[in-house]
Amino acid sequence: MLNKITLVIADDHKIIRDGLKALLSNIADFHVEGEAKDGEKLIELLETMMPDVVLIDISMPKINGLDAIKLMLSVNPATKVIVLSMHEEPDYILKAMQNGAKGYLLKNIDEKELEIAIRTVAAGGKYYNSEVSSIMMENLSRPPVLKMNSEMNISARELEVLKLVADGLSNKMIADKLDISMRTVETHRLNMLKKLQVSNAAELIKKAITMGLL
């Protein structure tokens, strides 16, 4: 009897989850025992399941993948995590590694490499596909970005708004969640853009991850 490698898939796109489940279910010793459409559901699953490997996307609602990695490992430290994402920015890769991911793969990998990555990580190793490794090697030669310091005077409420922006919430959704006006949300976002010296939300999230704010 084969020793099964148990898996949980976390991605907010059903077509991705279904495709991965169909693909992995064709491998004799792989068993997909659960799936989650967001980080919150993933944490709930891991309260009752103990999979060998979790495949997780970064861009998910409620709790994003990077935060979910830290939370899931606090629930079940033995679970191995592989990020499967379209994000190839060094900041995302580094943050995933810092949060405890044992692998990072871009979504353009082929089926065989995905299988190899899962087996490697399940056995206690680490796996980064060639594109990810190249990105990280290139990034090593760049000067480090300074961490946040008190001179930036970022408020707790601004950080709350920033985290919700990173989770993909609209200004209206943030306003409803925090019980504040949309104008207040817009003011907080504008303040964060100025303080981090960036010009749009994408740059804001990227820099915030680099600085350890997310």
Image (cartoon, rainbow, N blue to C red):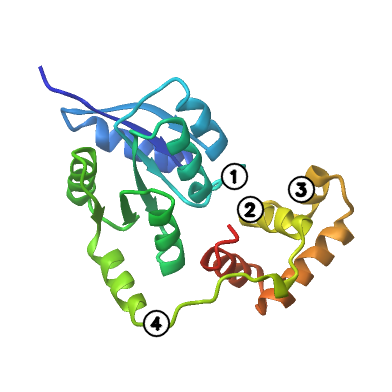
- Whole-angstrom CA distance, mark 2 to mark 3, is 10 Å
Label located before the other in sequence (2 or 1) = 1
The residue wearing badge 1 is 61
Q: Is residue 50 left or right of residue 12?
A: left
* Mark number, residue 173: 3
The residue wearing badge 4 is 142
Residue at far left of view: 1
Residue 123 locus on image (x, y percent): 18, 39
Q: Is residue 87 above or below residue 137?
A: above
| Category of crowding for the residue at label 3, using alpha-carbon neighbours closer than 10 angstroms: few (below 14), some (14–19), many (at least 20) | some
- Whole-angstrom CA distance, mark 4 to mark 3, is 37 Å
Q: Is residue 75 left or right of residue 154?
A: left
- Whole-angstrom CA distance, mark 4 to mark 2, is 29 Å
Q: Tell me the amino acid under the disc marked 1.
A: Pro
Residue at far front of view: 150
Q: Is residue 131 left or right of residue 170?
A: left
Label located before the other in sequence (3 or 1) = 1
Q: Tell me the amino acid under the disc marked 2.
A: Gly
Secondary structure beneath label 4: loop
Secondary structure beneath label 3: helix
Label located before the other in sequence (4 or 2) = 4
- Whole-angstrom CA distance, mark 2 to mark 1, is 6 Å
| Category of crowding for the residue at label 1, using alpha-carbon neighbours closer than 10 angstroms: few (below 14), some (14–19), many (at least 20) | some
Q: Tell me the amino acid under the disc marked 4.
A: Arg
